[in-house]
Amino acid sequence: MNNKQIQEQRMRTYFLQATREILRSEGLKNISVRNVADRAGYSYATLYNYFKDVKDLVFECVLDFQQECREFISDEVKNMKPGRERLVQINRAYFKYFVQYPGIFELFYIEKTTDLAHRQPTIEKIDTFLPSLMEEDWEVMIQEKVIEPEGAALLQEQIRFFIVGVLISYINRRYVADYPEVMAMVDQHLNYMLNM
Amino acid sequence: MNNKQIQEQRMRTYFLQATREILRSEGLKNISVRNVADRAGYSYATLYNYFKDVKDLVFECVLDFQQECREFISDEVKNMKPGRERLVQINRAYFKYFVQYPGIFELFYIEKTTDLAHRQPTIEKIDTFLPSLMEEDWEVMIQEKVIEPEGAALLQEQIRFFIVGVLISYINRRYVADYPEVMAMVDQHLNYMLNM
DNA sequence: TTATATATTTAACACTGTTAATTTAATTAA
DNA sequence: TTAATTAAATTAACAGTGTTAAATATATAA
C-alpha cells in the first residue's frame, strides 16, 4: 500500500468510526451525512470523496458489527461444548444482541441498499452469518445421530427465518409483548423445533 | 353524523385514497405529504387539518389493505375445504400478496409508528391478522386429531414468524434467491412444519 | 518561490415534515 | 342583500435530508 492508499484508508476509518458510534447509540434514523461528518471532524462534502453515498457508508459497517456480535455470542456460550444446548444458546444470544442494538438490526435486515451488485458480498455475509456461528453444533448433532443431515439443513433455515421474524416484530412492536415474554416465547419455540 | 362530520370524513377519504394508490404502486418511500396532497388535489398543509401527521395517514390504510389481502387469499383458496391443505395455501397466498405489494409489507411490518398508544389497536390487528385467516383450518385439524391443541398454537406462531422472516429477507434481498426458488423453499418448510 | 495537482469546504439545489401567518371560502346576522 | 364572523385552504417559512458543482485551501513538484 502506497502513501495515498494509507491516507485514504485512514480517512475512511474516521467516517466509519463515527458512523458506528451513531448506529450503536442512536440508531439508523439518526445517521445523516452532516451528522457523521461533524463527529468525524470534517465537512459533509468531504465524505463523498471516500464513499459513494450514505448507504455505502453504513453498509461498510456490517462486517465490524458482525465481528462484535460474534464476540458477544462467544462470550455468552463460553465453556459450552458444541451440540443442541449450545445451539439454542447461540440463537438466544443472537436475538439478545439485536434487541440490545436495534439500530444494527435495521442495518442488517431492513435498510435497502443502492448498488445491489456492488453490495452482493455484504448481503451474502448477512445471509450466512447466523448459520456460520452454529456449524460445529449441527455437525456434532448429525454425528451423534440426534438429527439427520437433510432435516438439519431445513431446520437451520427454519430457525433462522423464525428468529428474524420475531426480531422484526418485536423491535418494531408488531408483536405485543415485553422482553421477558418474548424471550420465553423464543425459548419455547427453539425447544419445540429441536424437540427437546 | 352531522354535515361537518360527513364532510370531514369525505376529505379524509380523498387523502387516504391517494395514499393507498402511492403505497400500492410506488411503495412507502414515495409517500410524502406533498405527493399525497397533490394527488388528492389539495395543498400539503390541508392534510394536517385531517391527520395528525404522515405516519397517522399511512397507518389508516392498514385495515383497507388487510381487507384487500383477505379477498386475495379467499380467491386463492376458494372451493377448498378447511384443513391442512388449505392452511398451507393460505400461508402461500399471504406470502404472495406481500411479494406483489412490497410497499404494503413495509407499512405492515417495518414502518415505525409515532403515537404508539393511539395506534395500539391497529398494531394488534396486524399481529392477529394472519392467524385470523386460518382459524377454521386449525379447528378442523384439531377436531380430526391431526394435531393437538397445544402444538397447534405453537405451530401457528412458528409459521407466522417464519413467513414474516422470509418476507423481510426476500423483499429486502437479504435472502439471495429468485421468486420460484423462494416459493419452493416456503412450500418445503410449510410441508415440513406440518409434517405432510 | 512559483506552478500544478489534490483535498476540503462552502454554496446551491431539490427534496422532506411540520407550523404559523395569510388568504380564500362559507356561514351567520343584520 | 350586505356586512361580520367563522372555518377552511393556501402560501411562506423553518429546520432538516442527500448530493453535486464551484470555490477555496493545502500539499507536492519544478
Image: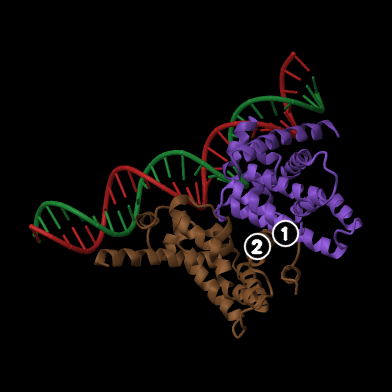
Chain colours: A brown, B purple, C green, D red
Q: Residues within 10 Å of mark 1 (few under 14, many from 20)?
A: some
Quadrant in which the N terminus of chain B is drawn: top right
Residue A107 in picture, x, y percent from top left: 54, 60
Residue occupying the point 46% across, 55% down: A119
Which residue is at the front of the view, B51 or A1?
A: A1
Query: In the rendered structure, which amino acid carries the disc numbered 1?
Result: Tyr
Residue assigned mark 2: A154
Residue corresponding to mark 1: B192
The quarter of the picture where residue A151 lies is: bottom right
From where the camera sits, is residue B165 visible? Answer: yes
Which chain is indicated by disc 1?
B
Quadrant placement of the C terminus of chain B: bottom right
Secondary structure state at the residue bearing disc 1 = helix
Query: Which amino acid lies under the numbered mark 2 shown in the image of this protein?
Result: Leu
Label 1 with label 2: CB-CB less than 8 Å:
yes
Is residue B101 in view from this perspective?
Answer: no
